Image (tube, rainbow, N blue to C red):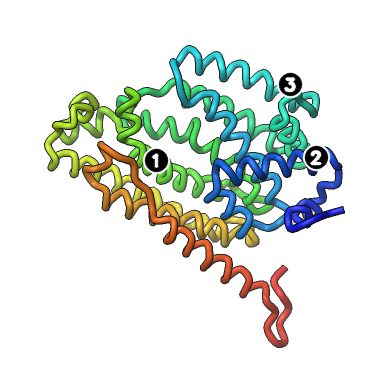
Amino acid sequence: MAQGRWGRVLDRAEVWDRDARTGYTVQRRAVRRFAPAEYTAVRLLLPAPLQPDVVILVAFMHATDDRIDRGPRAGREAALRAWRRQVHSALESGTSPVPGLRILAHTVGRHPALRGRVAAFLDGAEAEVGWERFGSEADVDRYVREYSLPALMLSMGLLAPAGDDGSFEEACLALITAMQRLDFLEDLAEDLAEGRIGLSDEALAAHGLSADVLRTGKAPAGQVSALITSRADVAARALAAARPLTARADRPARPFVRALLDVQKLRLAAVRRAGTTLTTRTCGPSPAACGAVLLRELLGRRAARRPRTGARPIP
């Protein structure tokens, strides 16, 4: 029944229904187009049976963000309410006129625990709609717990080992804290232009700054540099706390998790190099460096699966 590599992946995932196979394939193409780096990591490093489901969850997050990430707040709130109704209907009925939700319902049927993950993500989306600035560091941490973590756990929850005692999600919280803090730094210039900022008033004031001063482009360079360094340090501490995540993940998913952590190190280094220029332009790690991380993990994964003389292959 399968044709091509993706067809074999669907076979490995035991997706046999013809319409479902078509739906997964359509969403795969979409994710490959709008999130090529994430798509490549999933395809190279995750076990084949998990790939279709992770692709669909990435597509669902993207579809949600598309509806709530831009425009006036009232419009985004209305869009979220409408989207929640559509998602609820799809999961209750098992189908939907929206292709992406139709295949999401299929994925949730394959992994019933995802129903709670989807609900938590949509609950947290209210925090994404509502934020324009954060008064305190505690407000930033609350945003991460209420929105960023449920978003991450949509897909990462599939990588937790059976019988996890909660330590996997605890490490995921550290990881997403680092990732979100880096997001806010990388996107600082864009956010300032749109009238919002991911750095708290508390952190700004600690360096004698405010969002309005940053927007003028006339903030003292030394103070801006100290601000960026301090926020990067927060991300670095969170990333260090996330180190146990690889060992806590289900064994077949560890190459993917290790690569994810290492890419965050590259992002952190890029932010530190960018320094004060973050107020005027975005930044990110070198695609070549990210590619090298994926290649290293891919080769390591293949080597681990290759049987040695007198040894049994790792399943």
Name the residue rendered at 58%, 54% in the picture: 40
Disc 1 marks which residue?
183
Label disc, if present, on residue 89 of the rendered structure: 3
Decide: few, some or many residues near mark 3? Use Cα within 10 Å; few <14, some 14-19, many ≥20: some
User: Circle 1: is it few (<14), some (14-19), or many (20+) Cα within 10 Å?
Assistant: some
Label 1 or label 2, whichever lies nearer to me, is 2
The answer to whether the residue labelled 1 contacts the one labelled 3, judged by CB atoms less than 8 Å apart, is: no
Q: Is residue 39 left or right of residue 108?
A: left
Q: Earlier in the sequence, mark 1 or mark 3?
A: 3
Q: Amino acid at mark 1?
A: Asp
Left or right, 53 with reference to 79: right
The residue located at (13%, 42%) in the rendering is 222
In the image, what residue occupies the spot 56% across and 25% down?
A: 123
Circle 1 — which element?
helix
SS for callout 3: helix
Kindly indicate whether the residue at mark 2 contacts the one at mark 3 (C-beta within 8 angstroms).
Answer: no
Establish if 312 lies above or below 145: below
Q: Residue at x 55, y 60 (%)?
A: 247
Q: Position of residue 198 (x, y in %)?
A: 34, 32
- Residue type at mark 3: give it: Ser
Q: Position of residue 13 (x, y in %)?
A: 77, 52
- Does the rendering let one see residue 310? yes
Q: Report x, y in % for residue 279.
A: 25, 37
Q: Earlier in the sequence, mark 3 or mark 2?
A: 2
Q: Is residue 196 above or below residue 244?
A: above
State how far apart marks 3 and 2 are (Cα).
Answer: 18 Å
Dot 2 crowding, Cα within 10 Å, few <14, some 14–19, many 20+ = some
Query: In 3D space, how far apart are the residues under numbered discs 1 and 2 (Cα atoms)?
Result: 34 Å
The residue labelled by disc 2 is 20
